[in-house]
Amino acid sequence: MSGIDALDARLIELYTAEPRIGVLEASRRLGVARGTVQARLDRLARDGVTRGFGPEIDPAALGYDVTAFITLQLRQGSGHDPVASRLARIPEVIEAHTITGPGDMLCRVVARSNRDLQRVIDQIVAADGVERASSVISLAAQIRHRTLPLVFAAVSMAAPSARRGQGPL
Amino acid sequence: MSGIDALDARLIELYTAEPRIGVLEASRRLGVARGTVQARLDRLARDGVTRGFGPEIDPAALGYDVTAFITLQLRQGSGHDPVASRLARIPEVIEAHTITGPGDMLCRVVARSNRDLQRVIDQIVAADGVERASSVISLAAQIRHRTLPLVFAAVSMAAPSARRGQGPL
DNA sequence: CTATCACTGGTCACATTGTGCAGTGAATCA
DNA sequence: TGATTCACTGCACAATGTGACCAGTGATAG
């Protein structure tokens, strides 16, 4: 489960705020040696804490202004995976989960307009195994996807006598 | 609305796959001049297509193994915003939307376990203005959050006689 | 026909990167 | 107590990348 310390959190915070800064610059900002930053970044990546540094695309900037969450009910007997691979072929399906509760899958889709959303939904229900789809449209993103608070929460969660050698000096 | 062309899409794809490569390396891979890559990246950032290059954190690696989607019903009269700012104070609330349909808000939360999820939900319903919360747990992420297919879809969507000067040579 | 624009391909000085290494303090274990 | 391990510091080096330029070339738009 890795385990994160305060320096890791500050590092993540820094890179979240200014992603394109270099290792050297980061080390200056954090007041630690360059090698330390390098080692931390390597470890975070190795442990899978940072899944990557890829560009974050804003669908809205691409003309996909509408976001919707669609709950799918699947035909009994046909598994989830065939449906998922169908959905994966629809670019507008941004995310899909199997879920508990009355529905079987929840997916997040984007579309260029409400009318375009209809087209996307039609594609979804056309997938074999999908019985019903009920959708809710996102009117506004009150909280954009974020993980930074979680990072700091994970730090304070850690045992009081923090992580590893914990730094010298 | 900006508008994306095939080179932009390939650039985004490349940086998604290998986020830490430099401009020079990218220009080599794509077979274009370095200045072109620089200009493209600048434009994508300026137009808001790439919201940033921040590190993508995996909550699971931090011990937050449980993901849930919670639909909130709010008390009539109290607006969405006060609730949203309450929710923003809970680190485990990763995302929140106001939505159409029977519910008023949909939020995505993570927790360390099902038992821990209860704690998070308790915090949510404790927020003033929240009347009811119904949650579904994500059993598996069939499709992880992705935007790359969308980028390519946005390209092909573009007018056949693509974007700007469209390449010399 | 001319201006504008995106792109190429080149140069330059400068900063950063990857890498290796010795040394230090703290925790762990025998 | 002493040896080991680990994270960190601080330094050095060669290699590479960066931002900033430039002139030249097609294509597009007025």
Image (spheres, coloured by chain):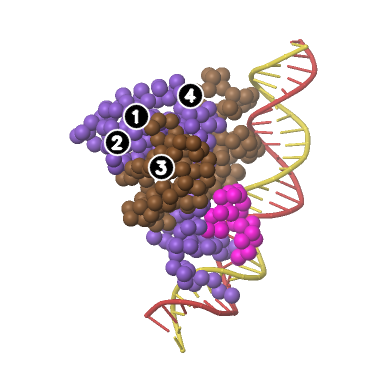
Chain colours: A brown, B purple, C yellow, D red
Above-or-below relation of B159 to B92: below
Query: SS class of the residue under badge 3?
Result: strand
Q: Earlier in the sequence, mark 2 or mark 4?
A: 2
Residue D1 lies, in percent from the top left, at: 76, 10
- Write down the quadrant of residue B68 in the picture: top left
Q: Can residue B159 be seen in this view?
A: yes
- The amino acid pointed to by label 3 is Glu
- The amino acid pointed to by label 2 is Gly
Alpha carbon distance from label 1 to label 4? 17 Å
Q: Name the residue under label 3.
A: A131
Above-or-below relation of D29 to B60: below
Q: Mark 1 points at which residue?
A: B134
Residue farthest toward the front in the current orientation of the protein: A77
Q: Can residue B54 be seen in this view?
A: no
- Residue B14 covered by magenta stretch: yes
Quadrant of the rendering where the C terminus of chain B is positioned? bottom right
State the extent of the magenta-drawn residues as a range: B9-33
- Residue A92 covered by magenta stretch: no
Q: Name the residue under label 4.
A: B113
Do circles 1 and 4 both sit on a common chain?
Answer: yes
Which residue is pictured at 48% across the width and 62% down the height? B156
Alpha carbon distance from label 1 to label 3? 23 Å
Q: Mark 2 points at which residue?
A: B103
Number of the front mark, 3 or 4: 3
Query: SS class of the residue under badge 1?
Result: strand
Instruction: Verify CB contact (< 8 Å) between mark 2 and mark 1.
Output: yes
Query: SS class of the residue under badge 2?
Result: loop
Quadrant of the rendering where the N terminus of chain B is positioned? bottom left
Query: SS class of the residue under badge 4?
Result: loop
Q: Residue under mark 4: which chain is it in?
A: B
